[in-house]
Image (spheres, coloured by chain):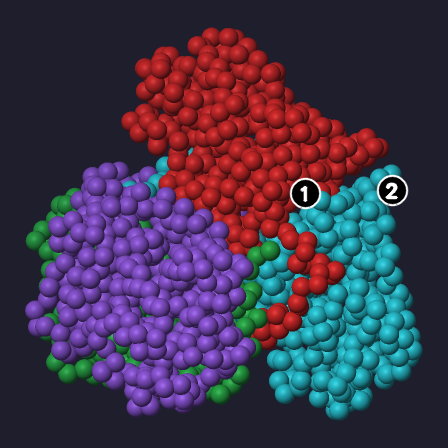
Chain colours: A purple, B green, C red, D cyan
Amino acid sequence: MKAVLAFSGGLDTSICVPLLRDDEEYGYDEVVTVAVDVGQSGEELEKARNKAADIGVEHHEVDAVEEFAERFLAPLVRANGSYEGYVLGTAVSRPIIAEKVVQVARETGASALVHGCTGRGNDQFRFENVFRGLMPDAEVIAPIREYSLTREEEIEMAEHYGVHVDATREEPWSIDENLWSRSIEGGLLEDPGNEPPESIFEWTASPGDAPEEPETVEITFEEGVPVALNGDERSLVDIIRELNYVAGEHGVGRTDIVEDRILGFKARENYEHPAATVLLEAHCDLERLTLTRRQLKHKSTAEAEWAELAYQGLVHEPLYEDLNALIGSTQKAVNGTVTLKLHRGTATVTSRESPDSLHRDDLASFESDEDQSGAEGAVRFHGFQG
Amino acid sequence: MKAVLAFSGGLDTSICVPLLRDDEEYGYDEVVTVAVDVGQSGEELEKARNKAADIGVEHHEVDAVEEFAERFLAPLVRANGSYEGYVLGTAVSRPIIAEKVVQVARETGASALVHGCTGRGNDQFRFENVFRGLMPDAEVIAPIREYSLTREEEIEMAEHYGVHVDATREEPWSIDENLWSRSIEGGLLEDPGNEPPESIFEWTASPGDAPEEPETVEITFEEGVPVALNGDERSLVDIIRELNYVAGEHGVGRTDIVEDRILGFKARENYEHPAATVLLEAHCDLERLTLTRRQLKHKSTAEAEWAELAYQGLVHEPLYEDLNALIGSTQKAVNGTVTLKLHRGTATVTSRESPDSLHRDDLASFESDEDQSGAEGAVRFHGFQG
Amino acid sequence: MKAVLAFSGGLDTSICVPLLRDDEEYGYDEVVTVAVDVGQSGEELEKARNKAADIGVEHHEVDAVEEFAERFLAPLVRANGSYEGYVLGTAVSRPIIAEKVVQVARETGASALVHGCTGRGNDQFRFENVFRGLMPDAEVIAPIREYSLTREEEIEMAEHYGVHVDATREEPWSIDENLWSRSIEGGLLEDPGNEPPESIFEWTASPGDAPEEPETVEITFEEGVPVALNGDERSLVDIIRELNYVAGEHGVGRTDIVEDRILGFKARENYEHPAATVLLEAHCDLERLTLTRRQLKHKSTAEAEWAELAYQGLVHEPLYEDLNALIGSTQKAVNGTVTLKLHRGTATVTSRESPDSLHRDDLASFESDEDQSGAEGAVRFHGFQG
Amino acid sequence: MKAVLAFSGGLDTSICVPLLRDDEEYGYDEVVTVAVDVGQSGEELEKARNKAADIGVEHHEVDAVEEFAERFLAPLVRANGSYEGYVLGTAVSRPIIAEKVVQVARETGASALVHGCTGRGNDQFRFENVFRGLMPDAEVIAPIREYSLTREEEIEMAEHYGVHVDATREEPWSIDENLWSRSIEGGLLEDPGNEPPESIFEWTASPGDAPEEPETVEITFEEGVPVALNGDERSLVDIIRELNYVAGEHGVGRTDIVEDRILGFKARENYEHPAATVLLEAHCDLERLTLTRRQLKHKSTAEAEWAELAYQGLVHEPLYEDLNALIGSTQKAVNGTVTLKLHRGTATVTSRESPDSLHRDDLASFESDEDQSGAEGAVRFHGFQG
């Protein structure tokens, strides 16, 4: 019997392998590991490769960066995807990883789908929803949750099985990375009263360490999707990579938040996402120029729903497509270029222009010689109820 | 016949006086002017006093700072009052100004209520809704709108009537100030493609000019209202004044936005509001710690409606009170202290604590030895529909 | 100069003709009248033709029944279009009438677009929004509103101009009819405390006069649109006509409501709409079988917005298309057949079936032998917040 | 060890007693049963008493009818409590039953709280949420779910334990009754394609069997709560009882619906609730007369959330109180009297009057001589966006 495991090479997923093989309740004599490239660092992917070789399993690496950007990040930008006030990050990478695990399972004839998530977090929901939706007959296994392992116990178990792990007792935080976002959680960060140490950040400078001189970037959108940076047409992947570097250097794109996990727990999370901050700032600004006020108001309602589905990994729920249909319809007008100044942790829109702008200088201006008295009837009935 | 005029001493309101007196369509032989202190600078109030003396009208000055803070800004903080993504500013001062104009009209036996708003903007809606609601039999007069005057024409008319005005043709932007917010509009700012010159800002440093060293502030809330700054109990007015100074110095609290005015025009506006940025950032953060996820989600819907009413000046609409009832009910749990670091244009929450915190270290932690397997059933039915 | 007038041959529109011609403020020597067939009775159309001949104007009749059903009623069914609790009626016919008036204006080279609506009601908003949107340079004229005429004054003016009118002082209510709905307002009906007399109803029997025996109808939907009645494929127009007859005979489809008009007035209205009641009842029922619960919940939010736009005649607002995109996406699954029993004023769904049904007998049944204990984790975390 | 069991005397709860006592996994030597009077028929309560005596357990009966009406039904009326289009019924009785079970557990010193719900339905969620919220240290036991028993197996088990049951294999539907609503499910009703047989209804006549003559009822509301029937002040319990009888006789108040259960199953349900239909019809109508249009629109959003919480039994979620605060604020104006005609399955409002009516005959009337031209400006800017 063969099981396919979503694999990062970290502590959680590494000890899943011996558990799946040796534990009599599972008893999968063949374990196939899968690492999906969603834009995390090369070292991360290498760690998975090496660990898989070390443990002695068949390892697959699936390059999904372009697909991740086009199928998941472009809709996120169009939806201004934010949950409880902050840009979505880790959540949006889970469905595509789960899809690729299923794909490898089909290719290798496996009958079980495995993830290394705990029973506290969100990823168990996101993985299993896709697993069950795409491969309903497969067995779904969550060894860490089923054994109810704490991190401490995992480390002991790894030692027992001879699995070498990087996570030592001294550096306990857990990192997740993709093209769009880097999350840091655990250890002293779990207490919402502790200020995060500067050392947890890798993508962003602190405002104090950022360059003295500001830098200007110009983002061009077509139908709500970024298509050019500083006037050069680029792929979405390239635009995000470049902005992560440039805006990160200027200290833009940190989030420190207590968020509500799916099960009902409140958890303190830190994120870095320089490109995301810049792109959503620009996109929202361009929408205010090109959408009607009724569109803006209603879209924000649809966005809240979109974000909840995305946060929960429910991208196969029909409503997700329905919301994308509405959002896509609004984005027909979201064309144009937004200029931002990056400086000392801030990303400030300084200028915007659009062929679909609804702003009319002639009408709103103090210098307009249009007749103003037409407003009288509108004012008279403002808020009227009789 | 007597008319009472909401009076700033600026161009718009100054030329209303001769129009009300000399124009045969109006013919008010007595004009009483009212300036309401809602926390604008002393020079602003002095300008009104001097201009009124200069023109020769009975002038009233009403101190409404405390009342403004308690009746309008405390609810705004509890409602995280933002319109189209940015903190509400000018809008919330209009109802109390209109109320005081009505009060003076009653005291002086006037039969007409006058404002100097144009027929393009929002304030005509906000003033007249309160005027008509509180004094239905009064005549409501809007000379600038009724004469359909452009700024250019107003300047000429002022010269004609011998009214001295500060607004010259060179410095065309229009400023509005209260305790909470300062708005700048007009002139080259009308074009959303023009970057605002640094000279328009008075309350905030630019990120580049802000101090090298960060500064920490600590805000304490009781039932969602700020009651202490850095551990010292202070009035809301004092907390806002102090934060405007401190956060402004660190470059915090600028907004540059294309917003939808009530009539349907899109207009480019710039704002400064250092205290508002800090307080709402802190308040939202504390809410994420103390409200349930269902409260957070639903409250954001109620907030959008609250903000629309506040933006439109509809604080006498019954729904406004209904929303305050809901929001007030949520705020029973919003108690605690939030620490922020101010630095180079950024205000970053670094720590939060609350006696009503819903965060439970023991449950969400990686080190928890609680049984995790209970989540299985919840995961199995996540997103299920059959 | 030529003006085109939306024309019913009733009192309001009839006196517009002499006003447009004889009044010096207007002075349109040529008036063209347009009656649009949106499914009202043949007598209505004949009345307009005869009155136009009587007054001596060029009269156009535009058959728009099919287009009305396909472009406006099919989306209404998909959106379960209801305003403040009752099915939309009159509102949805206005945009297409206005469009046809514009079309005739273009064909005849007219420069003014005219409607006979008063300054109290909704139709002025609906007509003018389309007029201004489609023909921005045309003059828009509303003689009844501009003269601020009461019905009494209109009758006198008609006598003055020698225009014969049917509306006598004894029968003062105002009727509007289209394929979908018949509205009755005015006279003693204006007081919400007066019970409507049975004589105002023409399309529906009273429950007491309806047949003793119930009748069964079967509606088949494809993508949310009715395509067959009792198993026979029929056009939407035919299905509506047939159901108006059959369900009306059984006393189904009356509404008596105090509704909020656009200006803020509350007005008492009575409607008849037998087919609408049956089709929306069936459509909602089929949606509950085929849409996920998240779709149902979110769609109701989108529907409320859709209905507000439709009620206000804002079908050229971009959000209207956005909402149709979302609704259209949901309707892919809304296929199947619903059976209703019509009896004594009631239309009761008795059975429904769909190839896209999400109902699974095997799972929800009391007789199911599926393991139930999986629910435990879901129950444990139900409403949990920690 | 003592366990307290929510007890109806039906099959599910009856076999819980021997399971709790004899099964070694539970081993509760003392079982106390509780039946809560929420307005179900006296025979139901007697059945529980007799069955408890038969099995030989200590039985408590708690009269909660008044409290149920005041604490749960009055808020429901004010919230127009409906889920997926139909009036809430069974759901709202569960929290008070669970509360009384907890109360008996405290009084009798029990350490376990038990319900007889299956693992498919909603009641397990509703009971356990209250159990865990009010008595966090108690053990919560759900024997039917934990044994994963089908109805068939339950009947066999009952025979094994010598427990006499009424539910035979021939009459398989499951009934639940309270003051407000009667639900019928199971058996052939599980298939949404089967028309419900007339025999399942006990509270309502069919339209065909209802009296020939209509009957008029008059409901008076104070702050949204019914306080008088036909002019006589009555308790809410009495008004509901009387209306259930009168309106039921006229065939009013049946629901046949496919609804979404909490776990995600779609289930077909039938309900009877004559008083509920009449009271909500009247209440909605009175709200349309007395609330502003903004209140009506926003309240419907709050109501949807209220209904979801009520359906899920989450009345101890803080948002539930927040929503009641908003709703309560709106209801200050919901005073007045509504007259309805009951006839052949229909309940039609024929008249309404209120001291807080916002309807103004003088303004909306065709005969009004108010100036209409004031609307022009409002019309001009209707839907405007520039």
Does B314 sit left or right of B376 as displayed? Answer: left
- The amino acid sitting under disc 2 is Asp
Q: Nearer the viewer, residue A189 or C245?
A: A189
Label 1 packing within 10 angstroms: few (<14), some (14-19), many (20+): many
* x 38%, y 29%: residue: C131
* x 23%, y 66%: residue: A274
Does B143 sit left or right of D163 as displayed? Answer: left
Inter-mark Cα distance, 2 to 1? 25 Å
User: Which image quadrant: the N terminus of chain D?
Assistant: bottom right
Position of C6 relative to B29 (above/below): above
Instruction: Tell me residue B368's x, y (percent).
Output: 46, 86
Q: Quick check: do tags 2 and 1 share a chain?
A: no
Badge 2 vs badge 1, beta-carbon distance below 8 Å: no
Instruction: Report the chain holding disc 1.
Output: C
Tell me the number on the disc at residue C352: 1
- The amino acid sitting under disc 1 is Arg
Position of C246 relative to A114 (above/below): above
Does D81 sit left or right of A258 as displayed? Answer: right
Position of D235 relative to B19 (above/below): below
Instruction: Tell me residue C288's x, y (percent).
Output: 61, 49
Is residue B299 in view? Answer: no
Tell me the number on the disc at residue A242: none
The residue tagged 2 is D209
Label 2 packing within 10 angstroms: few (<14), some (14-19), many (20+): some
User: Which image quadrant: the C terminus of chain D?
Assistant: top left
Total numbered labels placed on residues in the image? 2
* x 66%, y 51%: residue: D258
Instruction: Tell me residue B15's x, y (percent).
Output: 21, 51
Instruction: Report the chain holding disc 2.
Output: D
Q: Nearer the viewer, residue C200 or D209?
A: D209
Q: Which corner quadrant of the image does residue B174 belong to?
A: bottom left
